[in-house]
Every structure is written in C-alpha cells, then in structure tokens.
Image (cartoon, rainbow, N blue to C red):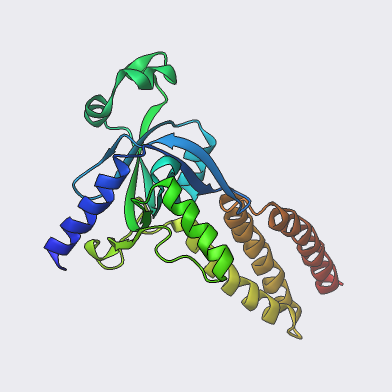
Amino acid sequence: MNTTATSESISALSSRLERVRIGMFTTVDGHGRLVSCPMTNQQVDKQGSLWFFTSDQSSMSHNIAQRPEVNVSFVHADESLYISVSGHAEHITDEDKIREMWNPLVKAWFPQGMDDPHLALVKVAVESAEYWDSDLSKMTQLLKMAGAAISGHPPENMLGEHGRINLSLTLSPGIRPGTPDMDILDLIQWPALLVTVAAAWMVGCQTKRKRNIGFWAFLLSNLLWFIWGWHSHAYALLFQQFCLAAINIRGVCKNDNDQHG
C-alpha cells in the first residue's frame, strides 16, 4: 500500500467535503429499494471516514443494520462541485466520541442533547469516491454549452477536474468495516438447501421408513427457511414455508397411517 498516495487521496476528498457538508445518504431498505435522506457530514477523519449524527430508531439506522453498504452524494451547484462516496456504515454509540463530535446545531434534532437515549453516530468507512470539481464561472460554462450546441461537439472540461479515489486497499483482505465477521443467520440458507435436497431424495424412496424420514427432514428445512426468511425479510418465502410445512405434516400423518395399515 502506498501510504503517501492514500494520504493524498484522503486529503483531496476531505478538502472538497469541507465545501459542502449536507449530502444525500442512500441505504437499501428491507425490500431492496434504494432510499435517501439528507444528512450533515460532521467530520472526515484521518482514515477518510465520514461521521454523521442519527437516531438509532430511524429507518436509516434499521437499513444500515441489515445492509451496511451505503452511498453519500454531495452537490455544491454554485461551485460546480459534485461528490459521490461509497462505503460501509456502522453505528457508533461511544459516549466519548459523541461528546467529541457534538455541536449546538445538533440539538435542533435532539432536544435532550447528549443525554438523548437514541442519539448515535454513523461512521462511513469510505471504500471509493468520485468527484467533479470545476473552477469555471457560470458565464464560461454557459458559453461552452452554447458553443457545443452550435458546433455539435460536446464541451471539453465542462465539469473541470475529475478524480477517482480508492481507499479499499487500506483495509485488511476479506474485512469490510461495519460488517460482522460472519452473520450466522445468513448462513442458515445453506444447510436449509442441503436438508431440502436430502428430504426430496428420501421422500422419493420406496420404503415407508425412508419416506417418513424425508417428510420430517422437509419439516426441518421448513423451519430453517422460515428462520432465514424472517431474518432476510423474505415474507413471501415465510408464507410459502408455512404452507409447505402443513403439506409435510399431512404427508407424515398419511405415511404413518399407511405404515400401520
């Protein structure tokens, strides 16, 4: 890793974010939709991470807990500055850090101040950023656009300096900030899949004993899929597994009756 290059990249990003503090913070909700809300960037730290105040009861906080991948976009139209930042977000509830970041303007959203029980910080560990920064005056830009319209050729350097910053190389391989090392509930889908396949094979056997084991295995897979579906907010899957479980219970009962008969 080139430390100097990384430091320069962070400095280039930080210096531009000082000129525009309010950005549109985009998360992914439980339905997989992109949703955005305006947020005020409080600081860009030495590692290039962005810091925001939030409530731990907000929909944004819930989205981050489920999907930490986020984007924050900043626009300063008067200065023709456009910034897009992508990274991983995490909640920080450290009281010392909250005290360090606190400023009187935040109290407008949190009347109880630093004693608010739902006050939290969101740290966005930046993986990549892209910016367009033009020092051209509005009149010059208009003239360039007029010239392009007459000539039929796109204007050159219309958006000024264009830079890309990649900070993901500063992370340890395989580690993403703000993401647990492994989410056990996410892994449930794999044993659920294996149990489902094994159950289907057993149910197709000729002997009633193996078919009975297959139906019970199906019920186990229904439970595993139900747990994973609840965790992933896959509500259609929950309904499907509930119906399949009823069918599998019927299969167990019918197979037992045939066996005793």
Q: Position of residue 14 (x, y in %)?
A: 25, 46
- Residue sitting nearer the eye, 5 or 82: 82
In the drawing, does residue 201 fall left or right of residue 181? right
Residue at 70% in and 77% down: 200
Residue at 42% in and 52% down: 140
- From what the image shows, is residue 197 above or below residue 27? below
| Quadrant of the snapshot with the C terminus | bottom right
Q: Extreme bottom residue here?
A: 206
**Quadrant in the rendering for residue 201:** bottom right
- From what the image shows, is residue 199 above or below residue 140? below
- Residue sitting nearer the eye, 7 or 59: 7
Query: Is residue 120 at all visible to an observer of this figure?
Result: yes
Q: Extreme left residue here?
A: 4
**Quadrant in the rendering for residue 203:** bottom right
Q: Extreme top residue here?
A: 112
Q: Position of residue 72 (x, y in %)?
A: 43, 47
Q: Position of residue 213 (x, y in %)?
A: 67, 72
Residue at 80% in and 70% down: 255
In the drawing, does residue 46 fall left or right of residue 38? left
| Quadrant of the snapshot with the N terminus | bottom left
Q: Position of residue 226 (x, y in %)?
A: 64, 55
In the drawing, does residue 175 fall left or right of residue 1? right
